Image (cartoon, rainbow, N blue to C red):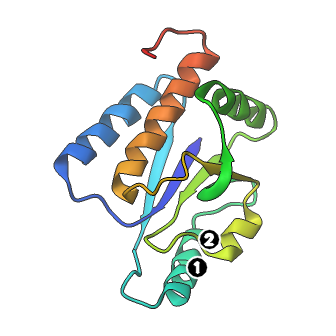
Amino acid sequence: MIKIITVGSIKEKYLKDAIAEYQKRLRKYREVEILEVKDEGILPPVQAMEKEAEKIKKYISGKDYIITLEIEGKQLTSEQFSKKLEDIMISNSNITFIIGGSYGIDKSIKEISKYHLSFSKMTFPHQLFRVLLLEQIYRAYKIMNNESYHK
């Protein structure tokens, strides 16, 4: 099982459609569950991240291999990302990705993360990033299974 825990919800139909499309494609390989927690962006940054972390932790199991999405994380090619997922799956059947809110991810979540991943030094809208993550997970499974996929 792959879980994506994300702060905030999606309102735009075109993003909901893209997310649904990648979830449908991924069913061939793995179940993907997306869990949303409320964005506390109206609070001061430290308080917001702490409150979001409390909500995120409710969805985390001791069996989860946690990957946080962070600007400071390690950048991988799609092939390296695919290999990383494949290696994780040898000993962990539950992979949990965490996408933070507008202020980022609280340090208490970063401390329990087993891998800190960055897609870029650039900042992306969190709603759009969900689509990017799903696409890369899908691409990773295509690579793992030696299936063709556009480059």
Residue at the disc numbered 1: 54
- Mark 2–mark 1 contact, CB under 8 Å? yes
Place of residue 105 in the rendered image (x, y in percent of width and height, measured from the top left): 58, 70
Q: Nearer the viewer, residue 124 or 64?
A: 124
Q: Name the residue: 43% across, 41% down.
A: 132
Relative horizontal placement of residue 127, taking residue 26 as reference (left or right): left
| Three-letter amino acid code at the position of disc 1 | Glu
- Which residue is identified by label 2? 57
- The amino acid type, in three-letter code, at marker 2 is Lys
Q: Element type at marker 1?
A: helix
Say which quarter of the image contains residue 37: bottom left
**Hey, which quadrant is residue 91 in on the image?**
top right
Name the residue located 40 percent from the left edge and 58 percent from the top edge. Answer: 126
- x%, y% of residue 92? 76, 41
Look at 62% across and 31% down and name the residue there.
77
Q: What secondary structure is marked by label 2? A: helix
Residue 55 drawn above or below residue 10 = below
Which mark is drawn over residue 131? none
**74 vs 97, nearest the viewer:** 74
Look at the image and tell me in which quarter the N terminus lies.
Answer: top right
